[in-house]
Image: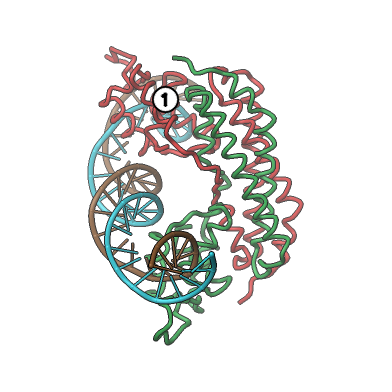
Chain colours: A green, B red, C cyan, D brown
Amino acid sequence: MDAKSVCLGLLSLREATGYDLRKHVEASGDHFFAMGFGSIYPALATLERQGLIERVDKSNDGGRPRKLYRITLSGRAELKRTLSSVEPSSTLRSELFAFLYFAHLAPPQRVTQILDDRLSQMEATLKSLRETNASGASAPSNAKFVNGLTVVMLEAAARYLRENRKSLESSRAAS
Amino acid sequence: MDAKSVCLGLLSLREATGYDLRKHVEASGDHFFAMGFGSIYPALATLERQGLIERVDKSNDGGRPRKLYRITLSGRAELKRTLSSVEPSSTLRSELFAFLYFAHLAPPQRVTQILDDRLSQMEATLKSLRETNASGASAPSNAKFVNGLTVVMLEAAARYLRENRKSLESSRAAS
DNA sequence: CGCAACATGTAAGCGGTTACATGATTAC
DNA sequence: GTAATCATGTAACCGCTTACATGTTGCG
């Protein structure tokens, strides 16, 4: 699932500009997929060239320079083909995992600081996800399902970190 | 945290060959970090050139062609520097998330099949992680902590998927 | 004897990240 | 008026993935 597929997928849910797509993935805390503008705009350009998406705003004379895209029939077909063939792995990756794995070599106060930061960031993401799901805003898709999955995983992680962090912080860095 | 840093980190735990490192990340279900041989061997070559790791086997005459590496003092220092400066994100990424997000466009029986596959793969990983942690094998590091974190997150995910999958599978693909 | 596992490496290609560059609109 | 947000795009670089290439050891 590369950037192009994800853009196509998001456009299958609703019309959007490149900026909208960025806000969408950002709002989900960059879970499920992270993309910057540098990935999105080239992807949209390619998708339009391939006829998988099209501009929905005909005349932008005078108006602000925005490009609103819509998925085409062949785009929808292509997306289905992709979803039929990809073999999604269930592995979860997190930079935090890698850091914690070697935390015994990091300065103890930095471990503490990073745990504090990440926990409060997790809380913020959880709050945002719960609000999104409470308002029935994401009706047309499985966003609710994935948000719910993210919530239970983040909850489990946050609980574990809070209950077990002492064992990390008490081990001191060997010289 | 690129491949080089992770190799360096793993070598800070114990001496290993490139093959060992691959087995190590593979055993953890490619959680925390995924690397193939094509990432590992070039990384090790670079690290050795930089004096951050060194060969521990002097004479491999006649023996099988294996290169056992050990971290050096300057390697340990470099790793600490890296761990002091990285800002690990707490975002979790999974291909499965992306697939599920657009699952309404995938063939229903494929959704079912993928959920079955991923759930049994999760169970296998959970079993393996629990066994690893039960045997006190990973004493020198925080592997136990990270494995424990992975376990609670996978448990939460598996439970959620089992309890809520019907809502995904009942929605049918629109043409 | 043959297959699986052990073991290392190279090279091309691709895709994403990062940094840069620009400009309009809205809110204070 | 000026700062933040909206909005789009380019280009170079870097590093990972993939595929290929090769040889050994141990087991049945």
Q: Is residue A69 above or below residue B60?
A: below
Q: Report the side of D10 relative to B12 (left or right).
A: left
Quadrant containing the N terminus of chain B is: top left
Circle 1 SS class? helix
**Residue B14 percent across, percent down from the top left:** 45, 19
Q: Residue furthest right?
A: B163
**Residue C13 percent across, percent down from the top left:** 29, 55
Query: Which of B137 and A169 lies nearest the eye of the viewer?
Result: A169
Q: Chain of mark 1?
A: B
Q: How many marks?
A: 1
Q: Is residue B62 above or below residue B44?
A: above
Q: Is residue A61 above or below residue A104?
A: below
Q: Residue furthest top?
A: B59
**Residue B3 percent across, percent down from the top left:** 39, 36
Q: Residue A150, can we see it?
A: yes
How crowded pointer 1 is (Cα within 10 Å; few <14, some 14-19, many 20+) is rated as many
**Residue B107 percent across, percent down from the top left:** 62, 66
Q: Quadrant of residue B166?
A: bottom right
Q: Quadrant of residue A162?
A: top right
Query: Which of B151 and C12 lies nearest the eye of the viewer?
Result: B151
Quadrant containing the C terminus of chain B is: bottom right
Q: Report the side of B46 relative to B122 (left or right).
A: left
Q: Residue at x 54, y 21 (%)?
A: B141
Tag 1: residue type?
Lys
Q: Residue at x 33, y 33 (%)?
A: B43
Which residue is the site of mark 1?
Answer: B80
Q: Residue B116, can we see it?
A: no
